[in-house]
Structures are given as structure tokens and as C-alpha cells.
Image (cartoon, helix red, strand yellow):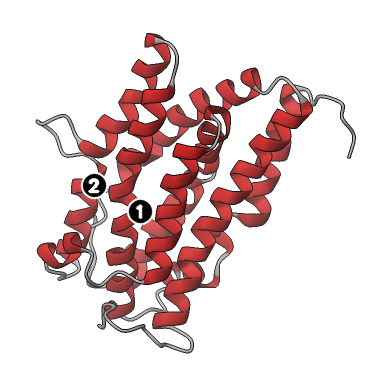
Amino acid sequence: MTDSVLASADLEQRLRAIGEERYHIHHVFHHLLHGGRLSKGQVQAWALNRYYYQASIPAKDATILARLPSPALRREWRRRIVDHDGDGTAPGGVERWLALTDGLGLDRGYVTSLEGLLPGTRYAVDAYVHFVRERSLLEAVASSLTEMFSPNIISQRVAGMLRNYDFVDARTLAYFTPRLTQAPQDVAFALAYVTREARTRAEQDQVLAALRFKCDLLWAQLDALHHAYVSPGLPPPGAFRP
């Protein structure tokens, strides 16, 4: 591999190419979800398991916040925590996700207890939190860049689910609308940070590897869901059963 440093535009192009190849919008489970080919119970399983990921994001972001070296950087990253935890007057993303699980007929106490969680979900999400805590700050920030690709998947998800499932409505899916504006703002900061701070080719390769790791982690969560609830349809002991 060449040791030459990539120009910022070339690094961004390579980051976006990772999403084109690896982002979980391409996973068969999402094609089933968006296409209306899942039962209500299978959609419930997706929402219940995804809750653990959503609920872990503020903890992940708090870890990054504590590592940022300046007030300006910390102020910018703190906004992400407010987006997910709320500010005490308006609900954040975690609360809006619970509105989704409520709307799907899941007991909120059961969802937040994590009792029905798939082991694969737990391992994947915990691996993400561990990665952000243990790897370099540059890698931790780079791992958030899957948000570059999220507006597209959100648009597909909302349109497809509203069109194909009579058990969801716009209020049930209210989590997703703010993310269409929040995610691009988050990306602008994180992308500027990694293209500025990755000064050597080795650091740039770490940035690329961090984004691949995050894409693989999201893919693994859907692998677990597909195996447990679609094919062969074998939920492990203790996991949610529709």
C-alpha cells in the first residue's frame, strides 16, 4: 500500500465508497423491512433490538465528549447527546424510539429491561461502545461517519413502512424526521474533523478502518435479526418471541 497522504477530497471519496459497499441499507433484512415483507412480530423484534443501539449512543457520545480537547469541540459534540437524551423539555431520540416500540404494541418496561435482546445485538453494540472508549479519538470520531449514509436509509424506511404496514403511522415513526436534519449537521463536523486531524497516511487508514468497523457492526446486528426471526427463524433462549 502506498504511504502517500490522501488529499481531503480523496479521503472523503474513500469514506463514501465504504458506505456504498458496506452500509446496512443493502442488507436483506432491510429490504424486507422497507418492502412490507415482514410480519408485525418481526418488525417488533427489529425495534426492540434496535432500542439497545439507540440507548447506547448517548453513552458512546459522552465518552467522546470527555476526550475532546477544547471547549468548542465539546460544545459541538454535546449537541449530539442532547439530540438523543433530550433537554428536559422536548423528547430526544431515545424517547422517540420508545414511542415507536409503544406504537408497535411492545411493553415499554420489557423493552428497556433488555430481557428480550438478542445476544448478537448486545455483543455488537457493546463492541461499539468499547471501540470508542479504547481506540484513538480520531478513530472514535470516524466511527460515527455512518451518518453520512443515514438520510437515504431513513427516507426509504419511513416511506416503505408507511406504505406497507397498517400498524404504523407518521406519529409512530416520529423518531426519524429530526434525524434528516441532525445527521447532516453531525456529519459536517465529524468529516471536517477527521479530514483535518488525519495528517498521515497511517492515520487516514485508521479512519477508513474505523468506518468499515462501524458498517460491519450495523450489518452484524441485522444478521442476528435475520437469523433469529426470518431464516432459519431460530431465536435463542431468552430472546423476544413474537
Splitting the image into 4 quarters, where does residue 70 fall? top left
Residue at the (48%, 89%) spot, across then down: 232
Residue at the (29%, 32%) spot, across then down: 81
Tell me: residue 191, above or below residue 221: above
Mark 2: which amino acid? Val
Judging by the rendered image, the residue that carries numbered circle 1 is: 53
- Give residue 146's position: percent from left, percent from top: 53, 44
Instruction: Answer yes or no: is residue 148 visible.
Output: no
- Residue closest to the eye, 163 or 179: 179
Residue at the (36%, 24%) spot, across then down: 66
Tell me: residue 57, above or below residue 30: above
Mark 1: which amino acid? Tyr
The quadrant of the image that shows the N terminus is top right
Judging by the rendered image, the residue that carries numbered circle 2 is: 94
Mark seen at residue 6: none
CB of mark 2 within 8 Å of CB of mark 1? no
Q: How many marks?
A: 2
Decide: few, some or many residues near mark 1? Use Cα within 10 Å; few <14, some 14-19, many ≥20.
many
**Element under label 2?**
helix
- Give residue 61's position: percent from left, percent from top: 37, 34
Along the polypeptide, which appears first: circle 2 or circle 1? Answer: 1
Report whether 91 appears left or right of 145. left
